[in-house]
Image: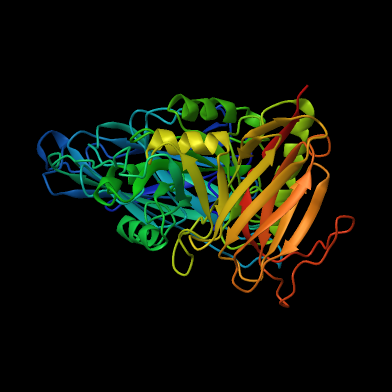
Amino acid sequence: MCQSGTCEHTSSTAEEGTAEEDTAGPGRRTLLMAGGVLGAAGALTLAPVGFAQADENAAAGTPADGAEVTRTITGHLPTGAADFVYLPVEVPSGVDQIAVSYTYDKPAVPSGTPGNACDIGIFDERGTALGGRGFRGWSGGARTSFVVNSADTTPGYLPGPVNAGTWHVVLGPYQVAPQGMNYSVTVTLGYGPTGTPFTPNYPSERARGRGRAWYRGDCHLHTVHSDGKRLPSEVAAGARAAGLDFIVSTDHNTSSAHAVWGEYAGPDLLIINGEEITTRNGHWLALGLDNGSWIDWRYRSRDDAFPRFARQVRRQGGLVVPAHPYCPYVACQWKFGYEDADAVEVWNGPWTYDDESAVDTWDAMLGTAMRSGKDWLPAMANSDAHSVPQVIGLPQTVVHADDLSRPAVLEGIRKGRAYVAESSAVTVVFSATGGGRSAGIAETLRVAADTPVDVCLEVSGVPNGTVRFITDEGQMHQESLGASGAGTVVWRTTASLAAYVRAEVRHPKADGTPGKGNTMAPDLQWGPMAALTNPILLRTRD
């Protein structure tokens, strides 16, 4: 469920390509520049492909309306190719559409060796600068062709005029076989007047809601605007079927879906703009973007560009969330650190071992935060659903928010006022009480060091589940639920013994047994997660 988007190299090895017109033979293409295009991830820019004077019979050399002119660019990329290969296209005036298709070879490779895989996208005449205004769309590896024009643009691409100037088709060879990669890119320009402009339909920032309440959401979802197979209408329907109150649209490396969600939002479903940024050193979610805002992904951890784009998201009131940090696929594991994160996705899709690792890392960071006195990082969970049979809302983040609105939901996540659950059938209520005071998730209970504190978890929806209470000392209490899946578990501690307490609810293991353990030697092979809370903090007072 992870899509890689870039690849690494800064070699100056020359790469050759040819460009051919439908009416002319091939011409030599040579490398113009190696590196430096982005000032970040490695990049190569090839010689421009020209379309001027394509039809000598047309007045002033401009083809008649309805005419199409095609060029095909071929080339070879060696192993260790740059992250991005830019193919400049000189677009003359009078063009109303640019269509691009591409292919690349997939030679057999030895077992355990990555084969060829190459993404594609396009930047317009405004340029390819990192974070600049020229972005017009990205397919990743989800499709082999696309069209950009004023209205009927391929999902993943931004509609608008095809202005004259130098455009750039971008190849992202994120895996190259030992034999290298042979590629072919075909560009077709269609001539005619600019069509009727596309009218965006952005979602509202507020839904009806229930005032201050717990709201269920899925903040990591994909559609046909990147590598998902579901239409936005199908995602919205799936969210409603899952009992969700809100979703965040997070297609890979593009903002194109933002402009269509208004049709599918409503009083019962808040839809928030977002993006999944897929770098070569991990993926992250930008949650709560302004309408049409796009976040660049063309950098690595060594480029020191991530903080810049994290700030760009926060300026919009959004959140920066590392996604599936232990995902085992190419370029998915998180390498940027957590200093610039607002939360972390510790559970992604059906529960697997990499989620277990993410929770362990997050728990260790909680301990560090308690020791240092720094802010702790909230946990969240999302489905990352792309297509059937992946289930929207499995898992989901349940947020305590002042209202069902973009600012309120994002603030609840930012403050950690949330727990995560497998589905809308699972509900928990978590609290700590002592010294005449009480606190809930993400709150602080201040009591005398030796004052008894009762930690209480109410659960429903997890038949034969196991409740675990975990502190900075590790697991301190375990208790089984009955066949009904509902129950209340209480455990007593003090602020002198526990700096924080969090709760987990686990399903039985595959053999039907709970994770057996005690406070000294808990069984490490727990069943799948059903729910997990952010912590309650315990502090001593005079």
Q: Position of residue 376 (x, y in %)?
A: 67, 33
Tag count:
0
Quadrant position of the C terminus in the picture? top right
Residue 30 visible in the shown view: no
Q: Position of residue 418 (x, y in %)?
A: 55, 44
Quadrant position of the N terminus in the picture? bottom right
Please say if 422 is above or below 338.
below
The image quarter in which residue 351 lies: bottom right
Please say if 482 is above or below 69.
below
Please say if 369 is above or below 145.
above
Q: Residue furthest front?
A: 436
Q: Position of residue 293 (x, y in %)?
A: 38, 33
Q: Residue furthest bottom?
A: 511
Q: Residue furthest top?
A: 542
Q: Residue furthest right?
A: 520
Residue occupying image coordinates x 42% and y 61%: 242
Residue 182 visible in the shown view: yes
Camera-nearest residue between 126 and 236: 236
Residue occupying image coordinates x 39% and y 58%: 239
Query: How did the renderer colour the structure?
Result: rainbow
Camera-nearest residue between 141 and 206: 206
Camera-nearest residue between 244 and 199: 244
Q: Position of residue 74 (x, y in %)?
A: 45, 51
The image quarter in which residue 486 lies: bottom right
